Amino acid sequence: MAAVLIVLGYLAGSVPSGLLLGRRAGIDVRRHGSGNIGATNVARSAGTLLGLATLVADAAKGALPVLLARALDGRPAVAIAAGVAAFVGHVFPITLRFAGGKGVATALGVLATIAPLALLCALVVFALTFLLTRYVSLAAILAAIAAPVAIAALGYPRSTLAAGVVMSAIIAVRHRENVARLRTGTEPRFGLPKKQAAP
């Protein structure tokens, strides 16, 4: 049962929400903006509503496998593993030849179910960083770093901390190009297109 739930988590994470939603606007988001299938690039390329829909869908991909594992298995470690598998599926989806998103929204969904208070701390870091800089990438990186720190400070189990560290490390690595652009001053600040494409 544990193996099945973990595999199902990975497959759920592999559903390319942003790509599918972008197609509703007649756009392949991989060919626009940063080329990423995450919510930020979908919002920039296909409009705010589809960007928000992508955020919700990607977060749900992280949360639902955890909830399903809790209902069917009951062991916390299995639920956490299913959530991390969903996160890995989003970042390295078999449906897109292992070239997926950066994992921020899916990690949000996982944390919402295994460490909600730590997620709240990470969201505060994200919001403050974004409001001060308008850099989504920087806000995401700092929030990802804050999450395992908060998990440890709040006394969550070691399995939860391990999940937080793994997701944080992968998010940081997936943002390496953004870090390079931040260093050179070429990273774009967040902004929506003036004229959005009709869905």
Image: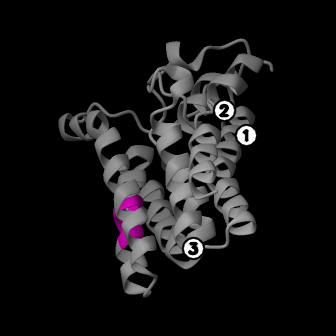
Span shown in magenta: 143-148
Q: Which residue sits at x=65%, y=47%?
A: 61
Determine the residue located farthest toward the right in the rendered image.
Answer: 199
Q: CA distance from mark 1 to mark 2?
A: 9 Å
Name the mark nearer the viewer: 1 or 2. 2
- Is 138 situated left or right of 3 in this image? left
Q: Is 133 drawn above or below residue 36 in the view shown?
A: below
Q: Which residue is mark 3?
A: 76
Q: CA distance from mark 3 to mark 1?
A: 29 Å
Q: CA distance from mark 3 to mark 2?
A: 27 Å
Q: Which residue is mark 1?
A: 53
- Location of residue 32 in the rendering, given as x and y in whole percent from the top left corner: 52, 16
Mark 2 residue crowding within 10 angstroms, few (<14) / some (14–19) / many (20+): many
Determine the residue located farthest toward the left in the rendered image.
Answer: 184
Q: Quadrant of the C terminus?
A: top right
- Residue 163 occupies which quadrant of the picture? bottom left
Q: Are marks 1 and 2 in contact (CB under 8 Å)?
A: yes
Residue type of the residue flagged with mark 1: Ala
Query: Is residue 175 on the magenta stretch?
Result: no
Q: Secondary structure at mark 2?
A: helix
- Location of residue 67 in the rendering, given as x and y in whole percent from the top left corner: 70, 63
Camera-nearest residue between 18 and 132: 18
- Residue 129 occupies which quadrant of the picture? bottom left
- Is 26 situated left or right of 83 in this image? right
Give the numbered dot on residue 67.
none
In primary-sequence order, the first of circles 3 and 1 is 1
* Scheme of colours in the image: one colour
- Location of residue 71 in the rendering, given as x and y in whole percent from the top left corner: 75, 67
Q: Which residue is mark 2?
A: 17
In primary-sequence order, the first of circles 3 and 2 is 2
Q: Secondary structure at mark 3?
A: helix
